[in-house]
Each structure stands twice: as C-alpha cells, then as structure tokens.
Amino acid sequence: MNWNQMKLRLKFGSVVPKSEGNFSFGIICGLLISIVLWISIIGWIMLIFK
C-alpha cells in the first residue's frame, strides 16, 4: 500500500465516522449474496440427482 492509498483510506474513514450503518449494510449484502449462492447450489444438486 503506497502513501496515496493510505491517505485516501484515512480520508474515507474520517468521512464516515459511524460504523454501525456500514456494518448492518454489509450484513444485509452478505445475506443477499449467500441466499443467491444457496439457491444456485440447491439448483445444481437437483440437476445432478434428477
């Protein structure tokens, strides 16, 4: 990580002081992605054992 990336990271961290909103947004995005993955995995299993 060079100096410009570190400055950008520090600036972004100071722009977003509260981390609770970002944390809940990350949990929601993770749940949506995992639901899509589970649906695709179940679909593949049903195709294999048809």
Image (cartoon, grey):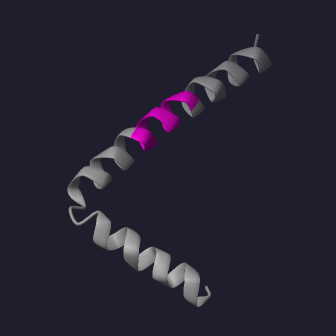
Quadrant of image for the C terminus: top right
Residue 2 placement: quadrant: bottom right
Residue 36 placement: quadrant: top right
User: Residue 27: x and y, percent?
Assistant: 35, 46
Asked if residue 33 is positioned above or below residue 45 in the image, the reply reads below
Q: Is 30 one of the magenta-colored residues? A: yes
> Magenta span covers which residues?
29-36
- The secondary structure that dominates the magenta segment is helix
As drawn, is 8 to the left or to the right of 25? right
Residue found at x 23% / y 66%: 17
Asked if residue 33 is positioned above or below residue 4 in the image, the reply reads above
Residue found at x 20% / y 62%: 18
User: Residue 32: x and y, percent?
Assistant: 45, 33
Q: How many marks?
A: 0
Quadrant of image for the N terminus: bottom right
As drawn, is 40 to the left or to the right of 25? right
Closer to the camera in the image, 40 or 24: 24
As drawn, is 49 to the left or to the right of 7? right
Asked if residue 43 is positioned above or below residue 35 in the image, the reply reads above
**Residue pushed farthest bottom?**
3
User: Residue 12: x and y, percent?
Assistant: 39, 68
**Residue pushed farthest top?**
50
Closer to the camera in the image, 10 or 33: 10
Q: Is 28 one of the magenta-colored residues? A: no
User: Residue 28: x and y, percent?
Assistant: 36, 39
